[in-house]
Image (cartoon, rainbow, N blue to C red):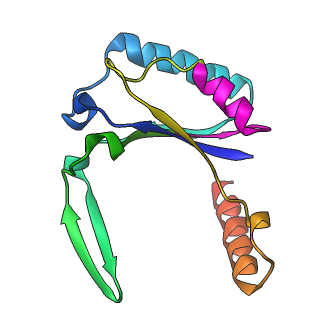
């Protein structure tokens, strides 16, 4: 099962404050442990929302809204994609994560949909073909 682990933003991350050398080192060590265990598929920190944009959908209309965005606690500051056997295993790994904040904060664990979660059909076949093409491009 794949999970996306979402690091929630903080006032510091939204202000563009860079992590300390100590924090970068602690995260590198944690990432190395996950890579050696064969569970880490991807992971990155994200720039503050002030450098981002949102696209609002309303019927056929699209509206671009530049950041920054309110409600810092609802924003994403980084993520990992991990592959583990269960949600419980994902939780156990993330309990070992260095605190990504210099204050109280959250990370969120969400299971990723797999194509097998959907009813078979032409749309799923199309997605599987796209996935196969992506895998070819990675090689």
Q: Which residues are magenta?
A: 80-95
* Residue 101: percent from left, percent from top: 36, 22
In the rendered view, does 74 fall on the left or right side of 36? Answer: left
Q: How many marks?
A: 0
11 in relation to 23, above or below: below
In the rendered view, does 33 fall on the left or right side of 108? Answer: right
The residue positioned farthest toward the bottom in the image shown: 60
30 in relation to 88, above or below: above
What quarter of the picture does the C terminus occupy?
bottom right
In the rendered view, does 120 fall on the left or right side of 33? Answer: right
The residue positioned farthest toward the top in the image shown: 22
- In front of the other: 24 or 90: 90
Magenta-span inclusion, residue 86? yes
* Residue at (67% x, 33% y) in the render: 90
* Residue 91: percent from left, percent from top: 65, 30
In the rendered view, does 55 fall on the left or right side of 8? Answer: left
Whether residue 68 is visible here, answered yes or no, is: yes
* Residue 56: percent from left, percent from top: 30, 72
- In front of the other: 132 or 19: 19
* Residue 79: percent from left, percent from top: 49, 40
* Residue at (34% x, 77% y) in the render: 57
Whether residue 75 is visible here, answered yes or no, is: no
* Residue at (30% x, 42% y) in the render: 47
- In front of the other: 70 or 44: 70
Image quarter of residue 40: top right
Magenta-span inclusion, residue 139? no
* Residue at (28% x, 63% y) in the render: 54
């Amino acid at each position: 099962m794949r999970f996306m682990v979402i690091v929630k933003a903080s006032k510091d991350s939204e202000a563009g404050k860079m992590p300390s050398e100590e924090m970068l080192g602690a995260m590198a060590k944690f990432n190395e442990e996950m890579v050696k265990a064969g569970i880490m598929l991807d992971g990155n920190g994200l720039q503050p929302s002030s450098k981002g944009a949102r696209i609002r959908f309303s019927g056929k209309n699209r509206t671009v809204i530049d950041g920054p965005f309110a409600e810092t606690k609802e924003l994403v500051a980084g993520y990992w994609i991990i592959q583990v056997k269960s949600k419980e295993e994902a939780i156990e790994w993330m309990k070992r994560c260095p605190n990504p904040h210099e204050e109280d904060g959250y990370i969120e664990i969400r299971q990723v949909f797999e194509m097998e979660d959907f009813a078979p059909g032409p749309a799923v076949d199309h997605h599987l073909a796209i996935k196969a093409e992506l895998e070819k491009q990675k090689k």
